[in-house]
């Protein structure tokens, strides 16, 4: 919520009021924000409030408003639909192509979930769009078929190939951005994988189909090993891995940094397959 608004004039009172405040967009400041993501949400609301009532947020901006996971820093641009192309500020990007469906979410006009995902796929990297799509399927009930339908409406538009790719590769089984990225990397390497496969008493992130090679993404769960919860989590993971290995599976753990080196991961997988990780 905007806590303080200061006009963009250069008078001494205005300059004094802006001192120590956080700039949301030109001429608009707030007293404080908790982080850059909160500032971006305020920026999105401010842009939406400045446009015609027909405007609604879409793409990465709508994804942020819906609390879908994003990787990296907040966008610099607010993505909107529902208004003609024009000059609305350097921080506004009007997304065109077909008539998207909009809806009200927490008092804001935003694109429907399928259109939000589709517009993300048009302006974001494959990885980042897949992370958004996986989360949308897992948390909102959105289906891949709905994204395919949007892709059909966008036939001939810029970025539609990205929408088709996301629709074909999204998976509600992914439980974190790291799992989504890991699946993309392994699939790009040519392996066919299954998500959230139940093996004995365990459920694994990814299983290379037709083998006993398990891929587990190590994320934030164990970021606090000094806490009781962190220590218990580590212990449970060790017990779980021991059970999998006793059943003949080879478990490869992957962290964020390793996802940027697909060739190295491929060598690890090939080594595991060479060690006899076949049924």
Image: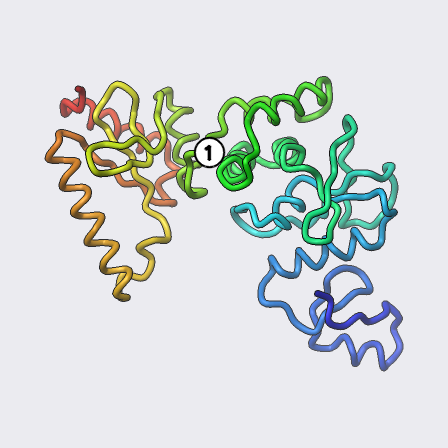
Quadrant where the image shows the N terminus:
bottom right
Answer left or right for 3 relative to 63: right
Is 259 above or below relative to 73? Answer: above
Count of numbered circles on the image: 1
Please provide percent x and percent y for residue 14.
84, 77
Please provide percent x and percent y for residue 60.
64, 43
User: Quadrant location of residue 149?
Assistant: top right
Colour scheme employed for the rendering of this structure: rainbow
Q: SS of the residue at dot 1? A: loop
Please provide percent x and percent y for residue 240.
19, 43
Answer left or right for 30 relative to 85: left
From the image, tell me which residue sits under label 1: 172
Which residue is at a point 84% across and 54% down the rendered structure image?
50
User: Quadrant location of residue 41?
Assistant: bottom right
Is 163 above or below relative to 244? Answer: above
Please provide percent x and percent y for residue 69.
52, 46
Which residue is at a point 17% across and 19% down the rendered structure image?
279
Which residue is at a point 41% across and 34% down the rendered structure image?
173
Q: In this rendered view, identify the residue nearer to me: 103 or 64.
A: 103
Q: In this rendered view, identify the residue nearer to me: 231 or 26.
A: 231
Answer left or right for 69 relative to 96: left
Which residue is at a point 51% across and 41% down the rendered structure image?
139
Answer left or right for 263 relative to 90: left
Is 262 above or below relative to 23? Answer: above
Residue neighbourhood size for the residue with mark 1, other residues' Cα within 10 Å, grouped as few (<14), some (14–19), many (≥20)? many
């Amino acid at each position: 919520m905007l806590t303080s608004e200061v006009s963009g004039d250069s008078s001494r009172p205005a300059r004094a009021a802006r001192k120590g405040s956080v700039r949301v967009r030109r001429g608009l400041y707030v007293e404080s924000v908790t982080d850059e993501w909160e500032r971006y949400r305020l920026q999105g609301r401010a842009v939406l409030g400045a446009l015609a009532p027909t405007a609604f947020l879409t793409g990465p901006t709508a994804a942020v408003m819906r609390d879908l996971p994003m990787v990296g820093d907040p966008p610099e641009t607010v993505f909107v639909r529902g208004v003609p192309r024009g000059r609305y500020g350097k921080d506004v990007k009007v997304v065109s192509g077909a008539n998207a469906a909009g809806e009200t979410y927490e008092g804001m006009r935003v694109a429907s979930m399928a259109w939000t995902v589709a517009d993300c796929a048009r302006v974001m990297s494959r990885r980042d769009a897949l992370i958004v799509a996986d989360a949308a399927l897992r948390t909102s009930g959105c289906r891949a078929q709905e994204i395919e339908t949007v892709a059909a409406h966008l036939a001939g538009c810029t970025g539609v190939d990205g929408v088709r790719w996301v629709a074909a590769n999204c998976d509600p089984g992914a439980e974190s951005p790291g799992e989504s990225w890991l699946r993309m990397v392994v699939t790009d390497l040519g392996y066919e994988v299954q998500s959230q496969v139940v093996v004995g008493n365990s459920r694994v992130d990814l299983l290379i189909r037709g083998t006993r090679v398990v891929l587990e993404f190590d994320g934030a769960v164990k970021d606090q090993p000094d806490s009781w919860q962190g220590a218990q989590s580590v212990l449970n993971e060790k017990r779980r891995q021991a059970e999998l290995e006793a059943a003949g599976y080879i478990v490869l753990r992957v962290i964020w940094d390793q996802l940027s080196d697909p060739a190295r991961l491929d060598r690890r997988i090939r080594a595991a397959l060479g060690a006899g990780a076949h049924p």
